[in-house]
Image (spheres, rainbow, N blue to C red):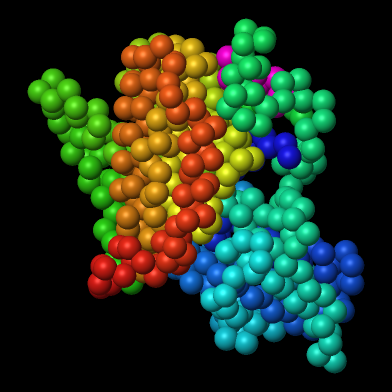
Amino acid sequence: MSVSVFDLFKIGIGPSSSHTVGPMIAARQFACHLRDSHGLAAVHHVTAELYGSLAATGVGHGTDTAVLLGLAGHEPDTMNPDQIAPAVAQIRTQQTLALLGEHAVPWVDKEHLQLRRKSLPRHPNGLCFRAFNAQGEEIAVCEYYSVGGGFVVDGQGQRVTNPGLAAGRDVQGHGQGLPHPFSTGAELLAQCHATGLSMAQITAANEQHWRSPAEVQRKLQHIWQTMAAAVQRGCAATGQLPGPMRVRRRAAELHRSLSSHPEAALRDPLSMLDWVNLYAMAVNEENAAGGRVVTAPTNGAAGVVPAVLHYYVRFLPGANDEGIATFLLTAGAIGIIYKINASLSGAEVGCQGEVGVACSMAAGALAAVMGGTPEQVENAAEIGMEHNLGMTCDPVGGQVQIPCIERNAMGAIKAINAARMALRGDGQHVVSLDKVIKTMMQTGADMKSKYKETSRGGLAVNVVEC
């Protein structure tokens, strides 16, 4: 399997890459399949079944909304977040859904959307779509799995990409011909030693297998700009987040406080941490509100990498566009190793696969832009995961709010400390990145399902909803 940096960093909408972005891609793929195989005119009605974690927390994570939008032809990277509520309200009010915006079929949630708590065989995040003709005969059935980070595979385990994307915008490739192939941390270090290139340079060369150097740089800048825009929106928005808990948005108030007292940094050198907390919380409040974010590598962990990257841009001398590209390419390389060898899915391995992976990616990336050797970068990434092992995914009320928002802030702070610890060493350490990734996957397999994005354990059952 070959994975691109731009598979890890996907632009989409909140609140969840596995429960919102992935199901929207799957639903649109099914609608496109109907168009191409039977013709939409042959379809009288469709049904969608959500399995496992998608059934347990799907409504709180917006899966029901994502399925409607995907069937209607919308795409997560282009959908205007402000148009989501009106589009869904129209479908539910009129009880009619236009497949791909072209062919109207009846839609009533209670009749056409089923929640099934059991899991399908391949993954806890399973979907099954069915289409019927006017005689009530089933004419098509497709299974999909949203396996974390917006990645989707079909019932045969083949990767599904967003069917509306233009050729070359999303990589399906198999990796033949990559100049510097790697799938483990050890292989990535070996490539660095053999070529004298940094991890970022290795990754950039591989990306240029699919895209021109100018296109790679343009896409990296677009990712950074989207991350920065999420921080800006989060710092400006006030009020409450959607859902029954009425969680108050805090980033705007924190931003006003920090901006109005710049002299605090002179009295308290750790006030920098307040800014990092702000950046992470701003992004994840935007995510919880269904806004535009970058999966990094998931939506639930979307604040960690932007927060640490903002720390680099704002607080480290000499920060520039080249450093931003180096940061994202290094973080992407580390994320690719996790994707190939473990999981990015909270429903499969708990939050260690989301915030833990994001912390590892950000730690290695920060070490790189601070001048670390490949060994120190690998060490930073290992530290970032080692101290997130066993982290559960227990969203209160099935919402990506508590403890998710603060958890991103803590992940960002851990990443900064991990990078600094690694840079104080020589890169030699006992536990390798590959060993900690293997341990993370084993820990996730041992973790009880109630702690894996089902809202049946941990904080999710010990906090009384308002």
Residue at the far top in the pictured view: 196
Q: Is residue 214 above or below residue 403?
A: above
Q: Residue 235 at x, y = what percent?
A: 33, 43
Please give the name of the residue rendered at 57% of the width and 64% of the height, measured from the top-left corner.
124
Residue at the far front in the pictured view: 430
Can residue 290 be seen? Answer: no
Q: Quadrant of residue 111?
A: bottom right
- Front residue of 241 and 25: 25
Q: Is residue 53 above or below residue 108?
A: above
Please give the name of the residue rendered at 26% of the width and 67% of the height, measured from the top-left corner.
463
Q: In which quarter of the image is residue 316?
A: top left
- Front residue of 310 and 149: 149
193 vs 252, left or right, is right
Q: Quadrant of the C terminus?
A: bottom left
449 vs 262, left or right, is right
Q: Can residue 201 be found in the magenta stretch?
A: yes
Q: In which quarter of the image is residue 431?
A: top left
Q: Residue 9 at x, y = what percent?
A: 57, 39
Q: Can residue 251 be found in the magenta stretch?
A: no
Please give the name of the residue rendered at 47% of the width and 56% of the height, measured from the top-left corner.
446
Mainly helix, strand or loop, the magenta region?
Answer: helix
Please give the name of the residue rendered at 72% of the width and 67% of the height, measured from the top-left corner.
143
Q: Is residue 427 above or below residue 131?
A: above
Q: Quadrant of the N terminus?
A: top right
Q: Residue 223 at x, y = what percent?
A: 55, 34
Q: Residue 397 at x, y = what percent?
A: 36, 69
Residue at the far bottom in the pictured view: 135
- Front residue of 298 and 238: 298
Region of the chain picked out in magenta, as a range: 198-208
Can residue 403 be seen? Answer: yes
